[in-house]
Amino acid sequence: MYRPTWVEINLDNLAFNFQQVKNIVGERVGILAAVKANAYGHSMREVCQRLEQCGVDYFGVSSVNEAADLREANISAKILILGSLLSEQEMRLALNLNAEITVPDYRSAEILNKLCSAENKAKLHLKIDTGMGRLGVWHNNALDFVSKVIELEKVQVKGIYTHLPSSGSDFEFTQKQISIFQDLIVKIKKNKINIQFFHIANSTAVCRFKKGFFNLVRPGIMLYGIYPCAKKFIGFDLQLKPVLSFKTKIVYLKDVPAGRTISYSGTFTTKKKTKIATLAVGYADGYRRGLSNKARVLVKGEFAQVVGNVCMGQTMIDVGHIPDVCLGDQVTLIGVDKDKTITVEELADICATITYEIICGISARVPRKFIRNTDTLLL
């Protein structure tokens, strides 16, 4: 089904960003690409196929369903399910998919031990809470937790990990978390417990905390060309290329005299005679209502203001200052047009939210086009 609204995913830029991560962490550190939430709205299957070609070590997904999607797409790389599995049914499916499983407590490890055999062990990553307050055993109980789980006969502990909730905002707290995790690793090794992977670093930590690399990192947002923290906090020249562009077309043009209100609730009134264009995009597509009367778009390489409230499937813009605007002209919501750019960061600032929410919020009803070596494939 065709719609005059779409997202473009540049797979070459994705590969470029992956190489930047590899250059930062070095050849001895593995990369687990976070591709949960449909690869942050970028389309998980195509993103993973490209990253697998780049030599990624792991994919991190949030659920069994996402792991199943990747196996159906013939992805053979290792998969770690980052979310907690509640039921035996989920656990069985994860095992059948040869996915590695996050274990946040001993109860989960016991259940998996019962479901497996000594010849076909469940591969586990134990989650330790060093300050997130979400999944995992508190760090002060971590050594006992690890010691108990490794005694189970039908599971294999492949990794131990934790998460950094404030790596972009609280340097001291993050340093403390890394130190706690380092101390745990020392204790594990002193107890002659053999664990293959220790991982803690998200995108911001990849950019700010080299001590947190260990032997596996978990970049997410930076793979998609979005800086994980303010550039001033990154101690080197990091170059990333945006992977996602969001575009639509003008579906209607109207000359509007001064004094007319635009859209629901009449929140915008024309101050002079102008031309209003209607776009085929709205909040049902993920172009948020919070952008009403605040955001700008690009038409023919010029900025145009969003006027009135964003509707469910349509948005109005003022193009009175742009010559020769025509029905069907392309409009850039996120991306580049000639020498001007609208970034995900700009829209996030307007909506008082984070970049993750903007890109993850682009609706599944918006078709994705994949660009590689200047060729475009519509999905």
Image (tube, helix red, strand yellow):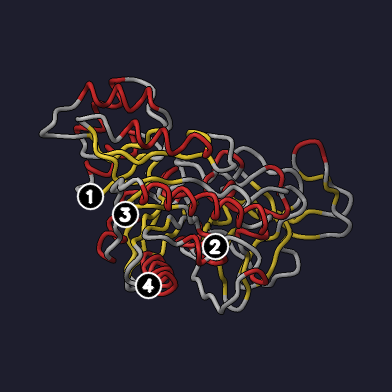
Q: What element carries label 1?
A: loop
The residue under label 4 is which amino acid type? Gly
Per the image, the residue denoted by label 1 is: 75
Of the two numbered discs 4 and 3 on the same chain, state the one appearing first in sequence. Answer: 4
Q: Who is closer to the viewer here, 17 or 256? A: 17
* Residue 86 as seen in the image, left or right of residue 333: left
**x then y, percent, for residue 114:** 22, 21
Q: Within 10 Å of the Cα at label 2, are there few (<14), some (14-19), or many (20+) other Cα atoms?
A: many
| Mark 4 to mark 2 CA distance (whole Å) | 21 Å
Q: Which mark is residue 48?
A: 3
Q: Within 10 Å of the Cα at label 4, are there few (<14), some (14-19), or many (20+) other Cα atoms?
A: few
The residue under label 3 is which amino acid type? Cys
Of the two numbered discs 1 and 2 on the same chain, state the one appearing first in sequence. Answer: 1
| Among the 4 quarters of the image, the one containing residue 11 | bottom left
Location of residue 130 with respect to 217 vertically, above or below: above
Per the image, the residue denoted by label 4 is: 26
Query: Which is closer to the viewer, label 1 or label 4?
Result: 4
> Disc 4 vs disc 2: Cβ atoms closer than 8 Å?
no
Query: Which is closer to the viewer, label 4 or label 3?
Result: 4
Q: Which residue is drawn at 28% across and 48% down?
A: 194
Q: Within 10 Å of the Cα at label 3, are there few (<14), some (14-19), or many (20+) other Cα atoms?
A: many
| Among the 4 quarters of the image, the one containing residue 217 | bottom left
Q: Residue 226 carries which label?
A: 2
Of the two numbered discs 2 and 3 on the same chain, state the one appearing first in sequence. Answer: 3
Of the two numbered discs 1 and 3 on the same chain, state the one appearing first in sequence. Answer: 3
